Amino acid sequence: MPRVMIVDDEPDVVEVFKKILECEGYGVGCAQSGGECLAKLKNTPVDLILMDFFMPEMDGRMVIEEIRKIPELKDTKIAILTSALFKKRGVEIMKELNVRDYITKPIDLEDFTARIRKLTGK
């Protein structure tokens, strides 16, 4: 069973995406901050991280940069999950960070689940 970690500072958002993914047959871990995400990844590897970009303390970019520094995690698939619309420079930054996808909220359920299946190979 593929494992997905949802990282978002809004508990309601985390809960909604957790339920969607569990219904699709994924194992789901959750973190409400960048620090919590990094701590959990040390003990529980995942197949995909869904990362909110705008969070207090550590934003998504900072968390991804830290993940990429950890040898056993550096190739983890990451998709941005955000309500923000990135301009050209934002898209370039995501490529530099090896982000695999950019999913905007609110989501289209069928599109979302299809993209997650593609990212996890499920």
Image (cartoon, rainbow, N blue to C red):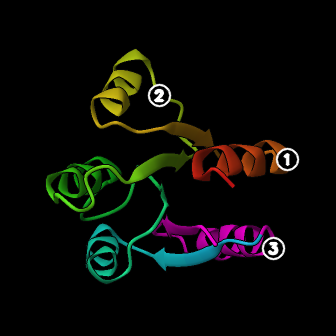
Looking at the image, residue 13 sits to the left or right of residue 101; the answer is: right
In this view, the residue farthest toward the right is: 110
Residue neighbourhood size for the residue with mark 3, other residues' Cα within 10 Å, grouped as few (<14), some (14–19), many (≥20): few
Residue in view at x 45 percent, y 69 percent: 9
Is the Cβ of the residue at disc 3 closer than 8 Å to that at disc 2? no
Which residue bears the numbered disc 2?
A: 86
Residue in view at x 14 percent, y 53 percent: 69
Calculate the distance from the C-alpha at mark 2 to the C-alpha at mark 1.
22 Å
Please tell me the numbered disc located at residue 28: none
**What range of the chain is rendered magenta?**
1-24
Residue 46 horizontal/vertical position (percent): 45, 68
Q: Nearer the viewer, mark 3 or mark 2?
A: 3
**Going from the N terminus, do you reach mark 2 or mark 1 first?**
2
Q: Secondary structure at mark 2?
A: loop
Q: Secondary structure at mark 1?
A: helix
Looking at the image, residue 67 sits to the left or right of residue 107; the answer is: left
Which residue bears the numbered disc 3?
A: 23
In this view, the residue farthest toward the bottom is: 43
| Residue 17 lies in the magenta stretch | yes
In the rendered view, tell whether residue 4 sits above or below residue 106. below
Is the Cβ of the residue at disc 2 closer than 8 Å to that at disc 1? no
Disc 2 residue type (three-letter): Phe
Instruction: Name the quadrant of the C terminus.
Output: bottom right
Which residue bears the numbered disc 1?
A: 110
Residue in view at x 34 percent, y 72 percent: 37
Disc 1 residue type (three-letter): Glu
Residue 17 horizontal/vertical position (percent): 68, 67
**Going from the N terminus, do you reach mark 3 or mark 2 first?**
3
In the rendered view, tell whether residue 27 sits above or below residue 78. below
Residue 19 horizontal/vertical position (percent): 74, 75
Residue in view at x 49 percent, y 61 percent: 47
**Is residue 99 among what the camera can see?**
yes
